[in-house]
Image (cartoon, rainbow, N blue to C red):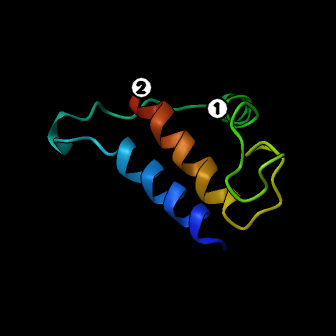
Amino acid sequence: MSRVAIIMFAALLLLGAPADPASAQPAKPVSDDVVHEVAAQLRCVVCQNLSVADSPSEMDPAMSERIRRELERGS
């Protein structure tokens, strides 16, 4: 994996982290269809011309799970 991809993924993780975990809202269930819809709008940091939803990258499941968690939090 390229250094740029690692930096971008780390930034995504850090920027999405709540400042105070106690202030995080309880998770609301999110359907796979909603996760796929959002993932289809985001570009994979590894396969730059593909969406996260269409990416064959090994990082795709982690990115999709992150999208699910953010949607469940209401972010």
* Front tag of 2 and 1: 2
Q: State the residue at coordinates (39%, 32%).
A: 73
Foreground: 22 or 39? 39
Badge 2 density bin: few <14, some 14–19, many ≥20, Cα 10 Å: few
Name the image quarter holding residue 19.
top left
Inter-mark Cα distance, 2 to 1: 13 Å
Secondary structure under the numbered disc 1 in the rendered image: loop
- Above or below 75: residue 7: below
Q: Is residue 24 left or right of residue 49?
A: left
Q: Residue at x 67, y 53 (%)?
A: 45
- Which residue is tagged 1? 31
What number is the disc on residue 11? none
The residue labelled by disc 2 is 74
Amino acid type at image mark 2: Gly
Q: Amino acid at mark 1?
A: Ser
* Label tally: 2
Q: Residue at x 42, y 28 (%)?
A: 75
Residue 9 % position (x, y): 53, 57
Question: Please, which residue is most extreme toward the front here?
Answer: 4
Q: Are there few (<14), some (14-19), or many (20+) residues within 10 Å of tag 1? A: few
Quarter of the image holding residue 4? bottom right
